[in-house]
Image (cartoon, rainbow, N blue to C red):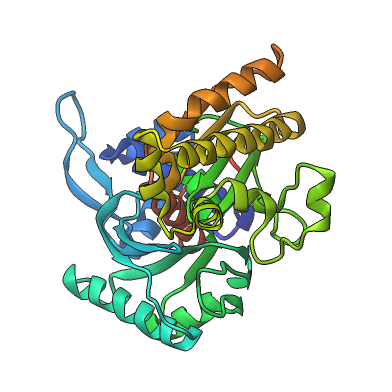
Amino acid sequence: MSPNVPNTLRLMNKSLVLNVIREHTPLSRAQIAKISGITKATISEIVTELLDEKIIYESGMTEGGLGRKGVMVNFDANHGVGVGIDLGGTKISLSLFNLNAELLATAQTETYKVATRAEFLQHFNHAIRQFLNKHAVSADKLKVIGIATPGIVDYHHGIVLEGSPNLPEWENIPLADEVSAVFKVPVVLENDIRSALIGEMWRGKCQRVHSAALIGVGTGLGAALLMDGKIIRGANNAAGEIGYMMFSREHLSHNWRNKGCFEVHASGSGISQRYQELSGQELSAEEISKLAQQGDPLAESLFRELADYLAIGILNIVAIANPEKIILTGGVTQSAPQFLPYIQAHINQHTFSQTLIQIEQSELGTQAPLYGIAVLALNQVYPSIQFMSDAQLS
């Protein structure tokens, strides 16, 4: 591009042209100029740059009409790929995505039951390598890896500050640097629920929504917030750690450090723990859910308790943030028919016209964090690509 054009304007023009091509591919240079409002001479320079970077390619000619035909320009979504990982307390999901943040392939494995972080990372890196080999991804094709993990994550520095108790020694880990050193590509790290919310914004129920909350009810309990178009991380990246919410004076006298008060009453591991304390039987949340469906009084009461606590937590979020949408996700929501009606009834009773909200269940489910971490990872290595131009993700 001409050197007398200010660098900021050059970058803005380049980003605009790239996204016009990506969204409307294929296009001629004349069509790009018409859509973007940029001069044909500048378009020609930008297209040449993008062709050199191999993120676009030429194919065929414009059809019909009089006069000179133009060469068509295409966005190459498969110029590179990334690996997205949702690192859960019980399952690990892997995905392969292209430059359009589309999932090309997925796989799932049980979370490794090992005692140390070093063992865990050895298994983890091996799983990524196997996944890449299975899909014949060469070193030059892999552009980025994104990891969504539970706990408090420093997104900007790629560090797990305080991790999930379900993962070994999962705190103060420069996880992005450790994985990047193995695979020699940039690695982007984010909290799993925050990633899932971005996934909902990209492909799920929060598209074109500017204020929302996603609550993950799985092995643990967490939330992510979108307020006025901005993803909220908080002063120390701990926004959304709702598992530590308390609901009565009596709760103040307990030590909730290992598992927060809200998490004890409204998560899969919490339900299992409470069922064992009250019955002496060790069952999974899924098994307890089946018992509740069969009319087991204790199982039924625990799911009603979960509904009540979730309703209180949601009402508090509504009072603070006034979101347009609240979405529930996570493994426990597979049992949503058992508790969602009770939650909605409480919400209807305790809100008014400006705060009334319908609680919805995610349709993306386990794919939401994979979509979200794909978008975040691509934002890092291809900042010119704009997936959601009206949202502030970082």
Q: Could you say where residue 148 lies in the image, as x and y percent from the top left?
A: 48, 61
Going 65% across and 29% down the picture, which residue do you hit? 323
Residue sticking out furthest to the front: 279
Compared to residue 181, the image places residue 64 above or below, namely above
Q: Nearer the viewer, residue 31 or 181?
A: 181
Taking the spot 63% from the left edge, 66% from the top edge, the residue there is 156
Which residue appears farthest toward the top when viewing the image?
A: 353
Which residue is rendered at x = 28% and y = 40% of the image?
A: 25
Residue 292 is left or right of residue 392, and the answer is left
Quick check: 37 above or below 54? above
Q: Is residue 98 visible?
A: yes
* Foreground of the two, 344 or 180: 344
For the image, the number of numbered tags is 0
Horizontally, residue 54 falls left or right of residue 320, namely: left
- Can residue 204 be seen here? The reply is no
What's the residue at 46%, 73% (across, down)?
186
Looking at the picture, does residue 97 appear above or below residue 348?
A: below
Give the percent coordinates (x, y) of residue 33.
41, 36
Instruction: Indicate the quadrant containing the C terminus: top left, top right, bottom left or bottom right.
Output: bottom right
Instruction: Work out whether residue 388 or residue 59 is closer to the camera in this orientation and state it.
Output: 388
For the residue pair 59 and 98, the one nearer the viewer reads as: 98
Q: Position of residue 56 (x, y in %)?
A: 30, 54
Q: Position of residue 261 (x, y in %)?
A: 69, 52
